[in-house]
């Protein structure tokens, strides 16, 4: 035994290492048993949330540090967390990705590397475990919202004063985009806007009108940035879906219907007020016509071609797919010898379900849909935490109609941390309710 349990958490002060072995383990557990490393278990996720809108390499670095901090805290109750449907459904997807290496084609190394984008789901049980015990889940949320607020203000400043740009971005459209691209930025800003609106509603319910109005103003800035500064067109779909779903969950039937009418009216107002939004949406028809008539590699045309190819490859091996890593290989082969945008090696079909169907067929699609369903079902109760979890899952499902967001870096880690932290907080609440119920008998 490395260490004995005390109160369900490893007792570092009494940790003992087996005789004859474990000098490295002794040093490791002694170091990670310090107050600093115990604090890192809470501070590191908050730091990751702050860094995520801005960086990738620093996020990975802090993720590794968090693993060192959380590992010694695991006890036998972690097995219970692993058996929870939220964990099992995610682990099943990782499992088929791992097994899919066996029936894939091509060199082994690219197939093994292709597990990486799915492997981030392994962090989900760890987050669930930790935030069942930690009362600091809100640190992660406010760290992320605070960081995105700074990014949003910088985005406005950059739009009006382009000379303030500090780093270049590779996106084809970069006005008002400080880092990465409009897709990532919209994903972050839309989540923040809806989460802030939930707290605004709660503030009004408690009679704190001034705070409620301040929060509405902040949420409005996020929406204004999306619709007037830098728009990824797919965000319009999940923003509308989130508005309708939250109205249905927060309001009685008649009030929800009225809210839906108000939402439609609001979208119509934004449509009229934003020539930028109208131009971006209406240009879809132009792009489709150029693709259909002239075989031009427009954004819409490319996506349609990616989907057609994915459907064809799925039909070739519908049950178990072509194996892990097959999507990149097949798209790379399809791009060989072509010029311009048609020759770009994209590696995925810009649709999560089609991506999964190429690599793991019908079985993989069932596991993906089951994971989404089990995760959303975990957040079907009342309360702000459950609604925030529902926002994360709903946003990921609808945005994944046009992107492979579970496997992308920013959106994928948003999903893992959103479900893991909020899901753990829900489980913590359930544990406290059970303890209270037992104690009151």
Image (cartoon, grey):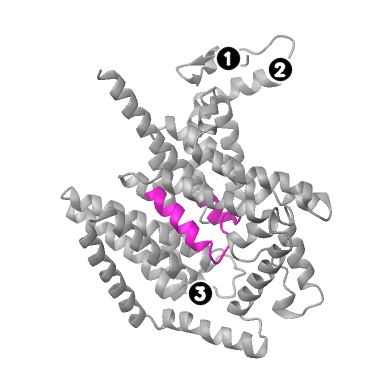
Count of marks, rendered view:
3
Q: SS for tag 2?
A: helix
Residue occupied by mark 1: 15
Give x and y (percent) for residue 160. 43, 75
Residue nearest the viewer, comparing 6 with 317: 317
Q: Is residue 254 among what the camera can see?
A: yes
Residue at coordinates 63% horizontally, 85% vertically from top-left? 291
> Are discs 3 and 2 less than 8 Å apart at CB?
no
Sequence-first disc among 1 and 2: 1
Give x and y (percent) for residue 255. 21, 61
Left or right? Give the position of 134 relative to 272.
right
Residue occupied by mark 2: 23
Residue 53 among those drawn in magenta? no
Q: Give the CA separation, mark 1 to mark 3.
A: 55 Å
From this viewpoint, which residue is outermost toward the bottom? 293
Residue at coordinates 51% horizontally, 73% vertically from top-left? 163
Residue nearest the viewer, comparing 222 with 322: 322
Left or right? Give the position of 344 relative to 267.
right
Residue occupied by mark 3: 175
Kindly indicate the quadrant of the structure image that contains residue 317: bottom right
Category of crowding for the residue at label 1, using alpha-carbon neighbours closer than 10 angstroms: few (below 14), some (14–19), many (at least 20): some
Category of crowding for the residue at label 2, using alpha-carbon neighbours closer than 10 angstroms: few (below 14), some (14–19), many (at least 20): few
Magenta residues, start to end: 388-414
Residue nearest the viewer, comparing 350 with 219: 350
């Amino acid at each position: 035994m490395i260490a004995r349990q005390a109160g369900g958490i490893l007792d570092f002060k009494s940790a003992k290492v087996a005789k004859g072995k474990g000098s490295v383990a002794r040093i490791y557990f002694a170091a990670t048993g310090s107050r600093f490393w115990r604090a890192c278990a809470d501070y590191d996720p908050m730091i990751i949330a702050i860094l995520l809108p801005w960086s990738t390499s620093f996020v990975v670095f802090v993720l590794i540090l968090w693993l060192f901090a959380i590992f010694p805290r695991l006890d036998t109750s972690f097995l219970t967390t692993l058996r929870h449907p939220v964990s099992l459904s995610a682990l099943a997807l990782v499992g088929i990705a791992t097994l899919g290496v066996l029936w894939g084609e091509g060199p082994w190394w690219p197939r093994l590397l292709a597990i990486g984008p799915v492997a981030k789901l392994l962090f989900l049980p760890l987050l669930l475990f930790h935030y069942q015990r930690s009362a600091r889940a809100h640190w992660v949320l406010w760290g992320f919202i605070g960081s995105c607020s700074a990014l949003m203000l910088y985005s406005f400043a950059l739009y009006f004063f382009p000379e303030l740009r500090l780093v270049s971005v590779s996106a084809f459209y970069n006005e008002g985009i400080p880092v990465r691209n409009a897709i990532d930025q919209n994903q972050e800003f839309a989540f923040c806007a809806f989460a802030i609106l939930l707290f605004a509603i709660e503030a009004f319910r408690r009679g704190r009108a001034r705070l409620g109005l301040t929060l509405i103003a902040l949420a409005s800035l996020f929406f204004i940035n999306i619709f007037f500064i830098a728009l990824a067109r797919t965000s319009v779909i999940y923003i509308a879906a989130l508005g309708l779903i939250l109205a249905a969950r927060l309001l009685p039937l008649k009030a929800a219907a009225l809210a839906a009418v108000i939402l439609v009216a609001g979208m119509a107002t934004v449509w009229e007020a934003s020539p930028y939004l109208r131009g971006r949406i209406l240009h879809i028809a132009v792009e489709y016509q150029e693709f259909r008539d002239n075989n031009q590699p427009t954004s819409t045309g490319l996506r349609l071609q990616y989907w057609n190819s994915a459907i064809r490859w799925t039909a070739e091996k519908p049950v178990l797919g072509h194996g892990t890593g097959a999507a990149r290989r097949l798209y790379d082969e399809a791009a060989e010898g072509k010029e311009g945008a048609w020759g770009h090696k994209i590696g995925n079909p810009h649709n999560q379900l089609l991506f999964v169907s190429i690599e793991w067929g019908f079985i993989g699609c069932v596991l993906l849909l089951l994971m989404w369903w089990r995760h959303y079902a975990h957040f079907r109760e009342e309360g702000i935490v459950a609604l925030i979890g529902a926002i994360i899952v709903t946003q990921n499902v609808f945005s994944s109609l046009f992107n492979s967001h579970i496997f992308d870096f920013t959106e994928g880690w948003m999903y893992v941390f959103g479900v893991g932290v909020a899901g753990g907080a829900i489980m913590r609440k359930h544990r406290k309710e059970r303890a209270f119920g037992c104690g009151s008998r």
